[in-house]
Structure formats: C-alpha cells, structure tokens
Amino acid sequence: MENNSPTALMGDRMMSEKDNSREKKIKVLLVDDEIGFADILTKRLGKRGMTVTPVYTGTEAVQTIRKNDFDVAVLDLKMEDMDGIEVLKIFKKAYPEMEVIMLTGHGSEKAAKEGIEYGAFDYLTKPCELEDLIKKIHQAARKGG
Amino acid sequence: MDQDKGTHNGYYYSLTRNMLLVIILVAIMPMIVVSSIILYQFDISYHEKVHAHLEELVLKHKHNIDGFLKQKLGDIRLLGKTFSYEELRDESFLRDRLELLQEIYGPVFVDLGVVNDRGIQVAYAGPFKLGKALYSNAKWFQMAMKSDHVKSDVFLGLRGIPHFIIAVRENYNGQPWILRATVDFVAFNNLVENIRIGETGFAFILNRRGEFQTKPLFDLIANKEPYTDFLKDSEKFQDGVRIIERDDDAGNKVIYVAALLKHGDWLLVYQQKASDAFSDLRRTLRVTIAIMLLAGICIVVIAFILSKRMVNRVASADQEKEMMNEQIVETGKLASVGELASGIAHEINNPVAIMVEEAGWIEDLLEEEEFRGGENLDEFKRALEQIRTQGRRCKEITHKLLSFARKTDSRIQDVQLNDLIEELIALSAQRAKFANVDINVNLQENPPILHVSQTELQQILLNLINNALDAMEKTGGTLNVSSELEGDYIVVEVEDDGPGIPEANIVRIFDPFFTTKPVGKGTGLGLSICYGIIKKMGGDIIVKSTMEVGTTFRVKIPISKDEQTEA
C-alpha cells in the first residue's frame, strides 16, 4: 500500500520544497497527449518548485527538446501520434544525459521494461500518486545532474 | 441432458451396428460367393467323375459277362462241330467231354445233354438223373430249333434249381439234333455279385420281362419302374451305358447304371444310393460348411470387437472435440470480454487520474494563506480526501479489469507451495478473526517445487480464501485449506461451511462479471481470472457446493514442467 496518510504527505512535500530551495529548479519536459492530465500535473509540479514544460504530442516533444535544456523528461508511452518508445529512442540519442521517466498503463509493463533497456531511468504505472512521481523526478535529476 | 446422452448413445449404437454390418457383409459375401462357386464346380466335376467311373465299371462287366457267355457258347459249339451225333450219344464219351470242360473251366458247366429233334434227351452227363427227359415244350428247345444256337433265360426247369441253358443245333443225316449245356448259376451269379462299390452299390441282371437273372444282393421290392424304363429305351444305348438318377420309394436318391447284355435280351443294372456314391462329396461339403461357419463366427466376433473399438475411439474423439469446443468458446468469451475490459479500463484511467490530480491541486491551493482558518476548510479537506479514496477505488477496479486481460507478472518461478499458502493464511488471519472464522491448514509434507508464476498462484488462492471468508462473514465458521499430491498434480482445496452456492449460479460461477455480491462489493471478475490463469497453467479448477453445508474449490496445479504452457 502506498503511504498516503496526510501527515506523511505533508512531510514529503515539505522536504521536497526544502530540496528545491537549495538547488536550482529542475527543468522537466512533460509529454502526455491527455491535455487535462498534462496541464494539472504541470501546475502541481510547478507548485513544488519545478519548471515544467507540457507538450501534447510526440512530434511536439521532439521539436521542443531541441530548443531547451531539460533535466528530466516524463514520457507517456501511449500516445496517438507516436509510440512513446520511439520518442524515447530519439531523446536518448540526442540528449543521453537527460533522464526519462515513463508513464505506462496498467498491464503495459512489458513496454516499460523495453524502455528501460533503451536507457530510460524508470517507469510508473498510471494513474500514479503524485508523491511517487516527484520522488522519481528528484532521483532522476540527481543522477543526471 | 439425459435426453442428449440418450440420442448420443443411439447414434453410437447405430454407428456400431452399421459398421458391424458393413464389415460382416464385406468379409462374408466374397467368402460365400467364392465358396459357392468352388463347391458348385466341385459338385459338377465330382458327379461327372462318379458317373464316368460307374459307366466304366458297368461297361467292363458288360464285356466280361458277354465274353463269358460267348466263350461258353463257343465251347459248346466247338464240341458240337468237332464230334458227331453218334459219338456224343455215347454217355460215357459225353461224360469224358464234361469232365474235360470242368477240368478247364472249373464247375461252370453242370451237365451236358444231347437232344433229338423231337425234344427227347438221348444222352446225358451230369449229377442229375434226368435220363430221357422230354424238352419239346421247353422254350430254349423251341428257340434252338429255329436258330442254330441259344442262351436261355434263367429258369427253374425240371430240376427246380435256377439255371440257364446254352444249346447248339447241328444236323446229322438231315435230322437236326441239339447239344445243350447247363451253366452253373452260382458261377454266373458270382460274375455279377462281385460288382460291389461302397455300402449300397450292387449289380444284377434282368431279362426282357423284368425277371431277375441273377440274385440281387438286397431284396428289391415291387417297384421295377426304372428297369422297365431302361428296357423301353434300350435301342438308344445298344452298345453303350445309360445312367440315370431317380428317387426310390423311400425318397432316397438312387443312381441307376444300365447296359444291355446278350444282344439286348438281358439288362445289366448297377444301382447305388446317391448318398453313398457321393459320400466323399458330402464329406467335403460338410467340412467346407463347417469351415465357413467357423470363419463366419470369427468374422462376426472380430467385426464386433473392431466396430466396438472404432466407435469407442470415435466417441472419445467426439468428446474431446466437444470439450475443446467448450474450452475454445470459454477462452474466446474471456478473451473478448478481456479486450473490452482493458479498453474501458484504459479509457477510464485517464479521466480518473485527471480528477484525482485536480482534487490534489485544490488541496495544494488550500495550503495558501488566504484559505487558512476558513470556515469549511476541514470539510473541504474531507471531501477532497474522499475524492482521492474513490479515485483509488476506481484505479483498483481498472487494475483488476486489466489483470483480467493481461497478467501482471507471469514469470515462471520455483514456488514452494506450502510457504505460499502459509503466507496467504497469515495475510487473511486478521480478517478471519474478525469474521469469527477458524482456519484449519492441512498441507502435503514436502510437496515438489512448482514451476508457475508466484503472483498468479497467489492471486488464485487469495481470491478463493477471500471468497470463502466472504461467504462465512455473517455466520462465522471453519475454513479448511489443504494440499495433496495426486499423480502429476498438486491439489489445493479451499473448503468453507458457509451457506453454499445455488445450482443455478454454479454453472455461471466462472463467467466474467457474474457476481452475487451487492453492487460495489465485487466486480465478478475474481473467479473468472482464476479460471483463466489456472487453465493457462495447464491445471484445472472445480467447484462443489451443497446448500447449507458449504462449498469446496479444488485447484489442480500441474507439477511437471512439460505440463504447463509457456506464458
């Protein structure tokens, strides 16, 4: 069971904020074709001291990554226009130092494991707890940074 | 269902019967036809052979008898020509001649006599005291006066003993005289009596009036029809032999073979019962029929066994096919439902995720200064927490749906069954205590290591244990979990003494979305998933339930690696 008692949540959050104040803001590229999800996640992660750029298609993601220097990418594997794994391959080829966290549907772990073989940092199953995602992003940023 | 079984049995019964008939027909018909043809040919050729043999026999004897008579006549003629009437009148001379003849031929000639033209015997040599007998009325005498020699029919004559006469006429000084000899009947009779074949074959001689000229071996009663028929047709086989088959008075078939003797005066008849003449044929026929019957019985027995065996094989193949069909339908049903479910789950996941995150966003915002100390802040927080909880519930449902379609972790591992069960029992102990349920565990000692997916096996057993606890939640009771080695399988039994499952529900219990739990309590997927998993492992799951007694689930897990299909 996930740790979801309110106090634990608060503690976790305060700690992450503390981390942020010390270090420079983590730049996150969020790739998800579910616009509503990408937007709210952008807001919530932004509130926790990250610079989040949401994009809604694989193509857009590939274009955006050339202009900015991201620390971590959060990539949905299931998108309308491009296969997430393809996007991942391009990411890792062009910017091997940028870590990629994949989001998969429940039961699509196979694809996620394939992604790890291609150099992704880790994966989370959707819908995931925000705290898990934040933890993963920090771990990835530390590794990549 | 019984009706169904009945029509099935009827179908297999008629299949057996048809197969039996076809095999018997195909095997026996050629045998009968070939045997019949061979037997028929054999019968014909055997008849021909027997007839030819009898004809030859009779013809030979005809020549013998004719030769015998001709020779004896020749002897007497030679006597008559060689010596004069004067010489032969002398009885002592005549006796010398008789003795000479008897010396040469044996006792064929009984006596000799010289008869003058008035029929008076003037000289006699022989064993009888016939002296000056008068033969003027004797038939042979009258015939001898007309032709120059005569062979008489057999008659009793003056002496009262059957005999026949050979007589020759000669002239002495213009007066005819006759030299006659009596031929011994016994010697002549032997010629004919010796013709004997089998048990019923014998020969005899008849004259033109149908009187016996020899003594038949068997008493021949009244019916002389066949013989007189022969006599009527006599011109047609002047020199040859005639053969007929006819039923006698007793209804037995008799073969008659006839030849004419003495220029048509006498008829040599040989007769034999057909059954006797053809006894070899009969024997062959009997042996053949016996062999055919035996072969027929063998064929019937083999056909019976063969068709029975074949139909059994067909029946088991049918059964297998039926089971396969059922399984295919079941699998297809599960697959299509799974497809649908995973589609829905994916679709629902995103909006739920957004809702939960939006709620989280509100929570984030509530942390801001402006809301601190707000009147309804606690109520907001409670509502948001509720959204979170319900969102998580949605997630669990969709996860279950997706598990149904795709297995979470189907990696094959070495699994220690007892450890796994103990773990699950420990997990459920708290719940069991709460529901007032005693748990009894009775495990097979040192069970073999299983090669299955641990997660999947856990999922199955946990599902069954949870269901059992659900069933006994209200009343309390006992949960028995046991494992036992049965051949190539380990069987785990999960037994509760809850209220049982009605029969109507039992048949649908593994169907997806079938549930008896109240809305919101169960998805109806648990057992369906269990069913899918265990079938994939190559095992089986069976449910037995009696109302008011309880329910037992038996899970058969294959032991050997080969048994299971790769995930």
Image (cartoon, coloured by chain):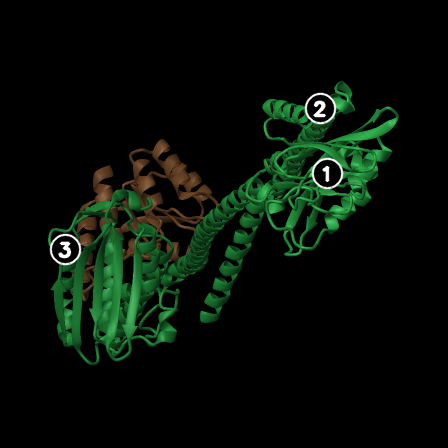
Chain colours: A brown, B green
Pointer 3 residue: B418
* Subunit under mark 3: B
Which dot, 1 or 2, sits closer to the camera? Answer: 1
Which dot, 1 or 3, sits closer to the camera? Answer: 1
Query: Residue B352 got which mark?
Result: none
How far apart marks 3 and 2 lie (CA) works out to 128 Å
Counting residues from the start of the chain, the first of labels 3 and 2 encountered is 2
Give B78 or A76, whichever is nearer the viewer. Answer: B78
How far apart marks 1 and 3 lie (CA) works out to 141 Å
Q: Amino acid at mark 2?
A: Asp
User: Of helix, strand and loop, which one carries label 3?
Assistant: helix
Evaluate if marks 1 and 3 touch, with contact meaning CB atoms under 8 Å apart: no
Give B18 or B132, whichever is nearer the viewer. Answer: B132
Query: Residue B75 got which mark?
Result: 2
Left or right, A70 with respect to B27, comes to: left
Residue at x 75%, y 38% (from the top left corner): B152
Asked if badges 3 and 2 are on one and the same chain, I answer yes
Left or right, B436 with respect to B98, comes to: left
The relative height of residue B79 versus residue B37 in the rendered view (above or below) is above
Residue B262's x, y, as percent? 76, 34
User: Of helix, strand and loop, which one carries label 1?
Assistant: loop
